[in-house]
Image: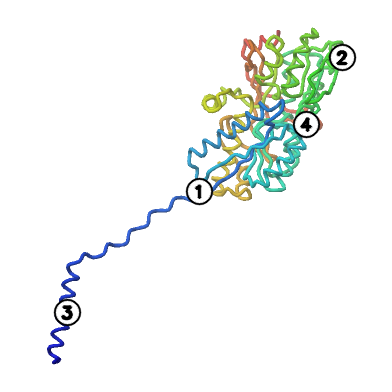
Amino acid sequence: MHKPALRHTLIASLVAALLAACGQEAPPPPKAEAPKAPEVITVKIGAASPLTGPQAHIGIDIRNGVQLAIDDANAANVEIGGKKVKFEIVAEDDEANPTKATTVAQKLVDAKVAAVVGHFNSGASIPASKIYADAGIPQISPASTNPDYTLKGYKTTFRVVAHDGQQGPVLARFAAKTLGAKTVAVIDDSTAYGQGLADNFEATAKSLGMKVVAREHTTDKDTDFKAILTKIKGRKPDLIMFGGIDPQAGPMVKQMKDLGIKAKYIGGDGMQTPNFIKLAGEAAAEGVMASIPGLPKDQMPGGKAFLEKFKAKFNQEVELFAPMGYDAVMVFIDAMKRAGSTDPAKFLPEVGKTNYQGVIGPIAFDDKGDLKVGPITIYVVKGGKWEPLEIVKPEGDAAPAATAAAGSAPAATAPAAPAAAEAAKK
């Protein structure tokens, strides 16, 4: 083939190829990648309380408060540090037993929970607190009131209720000034909570001029108190004060009525439950008084909405400390958000800096981990129900009994509801 002919053939082939290419559409530009969904991580929150035994109704109430908080947080699609978080509850039964509480604490540590809401009993919280502290896991008790719980110096230990260095003196001042009691018999259940509350009450009562005519001890397992009560009856006190829980307080009050003891009866938060009235019977319970750290539930800033939500979810009324359990979870989550991390080592310092508006009201901690603002409400049983009688706001921390609770600052007291105050005097 001649070279001119070859050139013509090549040119023709090239032109044909170009024409063919021009007839085709240009390939589409690459599509932009869709933004990736946030990574989802699971964060476990421990809940420790008695779920079996005579105090189970209180422990389950706390657990349900924790569960409700977790459900609300998950519904809100919480993101921490750019990651979506799914919270899970790890609930353990400490049986209101100090030894079992340490086993439960180690189990929660081994489960790698990020934080713990618990325990209910001071006798459980105190030994468990060292295990959480050693693991660097923050612990908020929704109910433990013995001052020793936060006096160990652990940076992991907090509570969202007033302590008995405040509650005991408030009860004693109420007994002396409002009830006009001159003589009192004091009984405790030999637990860290019951004995601590009774000690603080007794120290302040003596400083106010009340005569303690008897100091008796029982246990948190006993239900027959006739021997103790018979001894007390002969000393004719104006008032009997009990440091303990409702499974003992209910039968004790019932037996007082059977023995014809006319003394008034007062106790702390462990007996301020609907269950107490059931155990004592409405007739025996009428006029009984008890204090509880915190405002009346329907007067808490978020109380009414919480009570409705709790009833809708669990088909039962709040027993005692469910709002505190709920707020404890929310305090942890708030600290995680501020730290941008769910790692306990990173968000623990933020727990101590908490300034959170919870269901129960403002939550902030002092350098020991105690609630800075801890109101105390005194209730009376009237018409088969607990009714608020007086709201007390202690000015600062009262000292525990061993270090002069008697010298604590006077409390600022809200006026008692007239009808309830009159009922208490009867």
Q: From the image, state whether disc 3 or disc 1 is nearer to you.
A: 3
Check disc 2 and report its element: helix, strand or loop.
helix
Report the amino acid beneath label 2: Lys
The crowding category of the residue bearing disc 4, from other C-alpha atoms within 10 Å (few below 14, some 14 to 19, many at least 20), is many
The x and y percentages for residue 213 are 85, 16
Residue 57 sits in which quadrant?
A: top right
In this view of the protein, can residue 235 be seen by the observer?
Answer: yes
Query: Distance from label 3 to label 1 (Cα)?
Result: 59 Å
Q: Find disc 2 in the rendering and name its residue.
A: 231
Q: Position of residue 372 (x, y in %)?
A: 65, 34
Residue 192 is marked as 4
| Label at residue 40 | 1
Is tag 2's residue or tag 1's residue first in the polypeptide sequence? 1
| Among the two numbered marks 4 and 1 on one chain, the one whose residue lies closer to the N terminus | 1
Position of 64 with respect to 190 (left or right) is left
Q: How far is disc 2 from disc 4 in space, using C-alphas?
A: 24 Å
Q: Let me know if residue 301 appears in the view.
A: no
Q: CA distance from mark 2 to mark 1?
A: 63 Å
The numbered mark, 2 or 4, whose residue comes first in the sequence reads 4
Which class describes the residues within 10 Å of circle 3: few (<14), some (14-19), or many (20+)?
A: few
Q: Is residue 359 above or below residue 175?
A: below
Label 4: state its secondary structure: helix
Total numbered labels placed on residues in the image = 4
The residue mark sitting in front, 3 or 2, is 3
Name the residue: 77% across, 37% down: 99
